[in-house]
């Protein structure tokens, strides 16, 4: 069995071998740039970890790992553009470093490159793997569309929000896990339990991300703290706060303000969250998803010792500070 750190080294070394030498370089340079920024690489690692529950020759699933990571970074190029974000992993986003059109077109190229990686999977497994990858890709687009629509709505419900983050974030983690299991020849029950493990970890992961956007440290988080507050992003925190009559009027004043001091708005909205105890409420829900993830992983029919790295990874994602 490989440790998570060993798998991460394998993932990173393979990502570092990706070279785009096609012309024009102005199309491919931003791809190299966004991949060079690193990140947690959890998604590609999950494909290898899932496969490794059953087999040791993990090089067989490297194409899935690369496809998942390239696809994920493609979504970041477009998401950052749509969100008008200026920082990603502590560095300028592609549309800031280059321009909007480059972010769109280079992102499109990344999507194609992701499919080229998937196509390298052994032919016996390719139809099922390709189908799941395509379904997941569409689901992520649906999640992003919901996210954008929510920007124009004040009446977003918690169930709607949770479905949005399931689509936008959780399904790709789940896809990576299930595809690793498929190529390893796991049973359908195991593949499904690993998928559901990924869904619950993904939901908790995104809730944690939203929480860190308010309560994290900018130096370790890699993004500006309070960014979600400044753009009135509908998060678990804001949706809950808007449903509280005592806070709604003040929140609406801040949401409708066009001219404001950024630090003042961040402090005012954070104070509302603190008053309503929403940090704890969010942490409780994260813990609920963590517990459900463990139940799903418990059901996977391999020795518990082989699943130790996945148990540990799930815990680290739920308790992370960056």
Image (cartoon, helix red, strand yellow):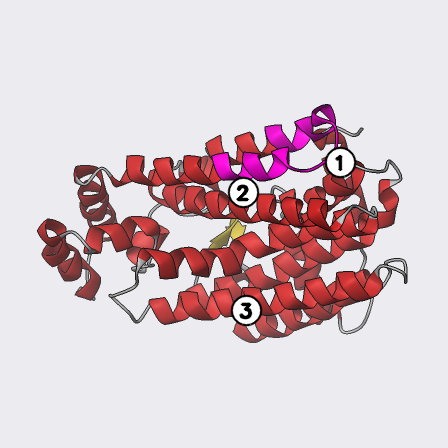
- Chain part drawn in magenta: 291-312
Image quadrant containing the N terminus:
top right
Instruction: Give the left or right position of residue 115, taking residue 147 as reference.
Output: right
Q: Are marks 2 and 1 in contact (CB under 8 Å)?
A: no
Residue 318 visible somewhere in the drawing:
yes
Residue ID at (36%, 57%): 159
Q: Residues within 10 Å of mark 2 (few under 14, many from 20)?
A: many
Q: Are marks 3 and 1 in contact (CB under 8 Å)?
A: no
Tell me the tag on residue 303: none
- Tell which circle, 2 or 3, labels the residue nearer the N-terminal end: 3
Residue 98 visible somewhere in the drawing:
no
Q: Nearer the viewer, residue 269 or 317?
A: 317
Tell me the tag on residue 7: 1
Q: On the image, numbered disc 3 is attached to which residue?
A: 141
- Tell which circle, 3 or 1, labels the residue nearer the N-terminal end: 1
Residue ID at (72%, 37%): 8
- Tell which circle, 2 or 1, labels the residue nearer the N-terminal end: 1
Q: Nearer the viewer, residue 279 or 183?
A: 183
């Amino acid at each position: 069995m490989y440790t998570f750190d060993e798998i991460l080294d394998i993932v990173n070394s393979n990502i570092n071998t990706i070279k785009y030498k096609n012309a024009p370089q102005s199309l491919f340079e931003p791809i190299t740039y966004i991949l060079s920024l690193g990140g947690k690489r959890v998604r590609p690692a999950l494909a290898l970890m899932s496969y490794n529950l059953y087999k040791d020759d993990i090089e067989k699933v490297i194409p899935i790992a690369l496809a998942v990571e390239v696809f994920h970074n493609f979504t970041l190029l477009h998401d950052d553009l749509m969100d008008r974000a200026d920082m990603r992993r502590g560095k300028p986003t592609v549309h800031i470093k280059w321009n909007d059109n480059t972010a769109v077109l280079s992102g499109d190229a990344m999507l194609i490159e992701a499919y080229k990686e998937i196509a390298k999977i052994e032919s016996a497994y390719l139809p099922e793997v390709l189908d799941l990858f395509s379904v997941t890709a569409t689901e992520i687009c649906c999640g992003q569309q919901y996210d954008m629509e929510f920007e124009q709505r004040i009446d977003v419900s918690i169930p709607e929000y949770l479905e949005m983050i399931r689509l936008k974030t959780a399904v790709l983690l789940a896809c990576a896990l299930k595809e690793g299991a498929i190529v390893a020849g796991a049973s359908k029950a195991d593949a499904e339990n690993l998928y559901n493990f990924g869904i619950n970890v993904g939901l908790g992961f995104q809730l944690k991300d939203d929480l860190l956007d308010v309560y994290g440290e900018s130096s370790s988080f890699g993004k500006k703290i309070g960014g979600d507050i400044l753009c009135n992003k509908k998060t678990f925190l804001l949706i809950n706060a808007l449903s509280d009559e005592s806070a709604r009027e003040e929140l609406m004043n801040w949401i409708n303000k066009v001219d404001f001091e950024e630090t003042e708005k961040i402090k005012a909205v954070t104070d509302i969250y603190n008053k309503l105890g929403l940090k704890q409420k969010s942490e409780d829900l994260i813990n609920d998803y963590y517990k459900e993830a463990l139940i799903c992983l418990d059901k996977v029919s391999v020795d518990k010792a082989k699943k130790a790295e996945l148990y540990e990874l799930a815990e680290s994602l739920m308790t992370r500070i960056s």
